[in-house]
Amino acid sequence: PEEKKPQIVFVLGGPGAGKGTQCSKIVERYHFVHLSAGDLLREERAREGSEYGTLIEDYIRNGKIVPVEVTCSLLEKAMQNSGKNRFLIDGFPRNQDNLDGWTRQMADKVNFQFVLFFNCNEDTCVERCLARGQGGSGRSDDNLESLKKRIQTYNNDSLPIIKHYEQLGQVKQVDANPSAEEVFKKVEDIFSEAGF
Ligand code: UP5
Ligand code: MG
């Protein structure tokens, strides 16, 4: 039955928009499990015996989007292993290949709720990621060269996916430029109104 299927919220927005930060706050307050596609890929890259380690590193450093078969399987496994049934899927789907792959592999197995879109100025995004890199994030893509590519990929490939959901009336947009606390107030309004 429909209500047994896991409930899914996609969390999208540019690099450094604050997806991970806000997802942590949502998890503190609401019964959701946070699954960051980027975090899952970085874990898989580091996993001993992974056949995808070098491929993932090449894609991440160049701000390119990993083929959906890899990402979608990591997401499905993480959902199954959690034993829970409400998920924030952070940073996915970010291009047409992601969306097509998800539709093939997962759409029938989940109860999609909405896209939570953190809309952030490009300059703010870049500043935040550079600051994080200087603070020692250890992320191989928190440098200006990678960031230019990440922004370009976001504008060319990811924004059209957000627009696609917008046309379906399935996007809840939040201005991501203010402080994390201010942004979260708006997020709380959305989650409370949605009945979570
Ligand atoms: N910060 C956060 N909110 C703030 C606020 N309101 N005011 C001031 N500072 C704020 O935040 C970034 C930094 O800003 C932090 O230092 C934070 O303290 C501060 P964070 O919450 O981490 O932002 P987030 O949007 O999560 O940024 P992230 O860098 O994770 O976004 P990306 O979308 O670029 O990274 P992701 O990990 O999702 O993907 C990385 C790469 O993996 C992609 O480029 C791609 O190569 C690959 N990938 C795929 O191929 N497929 C996928 O499906 C997913 C990823
Ligand atoms: Mg993140």
Image (tube, rainbow, N blue to C red):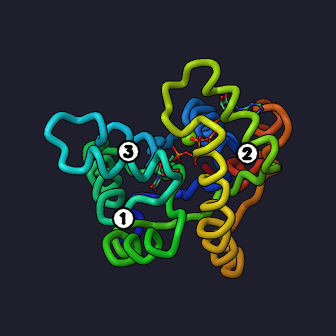
Mark 1 vs mark 2: in front: 1
> Residue lying furthest top in this view?
135
Instruction: From the image, tell me which residue sits under label 3.
Output: 57
Closer-to-camera residue (26/16) = 16
Which residue is painted at 29% across and 42% down in the image?
44
Q: Amino acid at mark 1?
A: Pro
Is 157 above or below relative to 81? Answer: below
Mark 1 vs mark 3: in front: 3
Q: Badge 2 local density, few (<14 within 10 Å), some, or many (20+)?
A: many
Per the image, label 2 sits on a secondary structure element best described as helix
Residue 143 % position (x, y): 61, 36
**Between disc 3 and disc 2, whose residue precedes?**
3
Instruction: From the image, tell me which residue sits under label 1.
Output: 67
Instruction: From the image, tell me which residue sits under label 2.
Output: 187
| Distance Cα–Cα, label 1 vs label 3 | 13 Å
Is 4 above or below relative to 26? Answer: below
**Between disc 1 and disc 3, whose residue precedes?**
3
Answer yes or no: is residue 122 visible. yes
| Distance Cα–Cα, label 1 vs label 2 | 30 Å
> Residue lying furthest front in this view?
145
Is 87 above or below relative to 33? Answer: below
| Distance Cα–Cα, label 3 vs label 2 | 32 Å
Q: Are marks 1 and 3 in contact (CB under 8 Å)?
A: no
Residue 37 % position (x, y): 44, 49
Which residue is painted at 59% across and 35% down in the image?
142
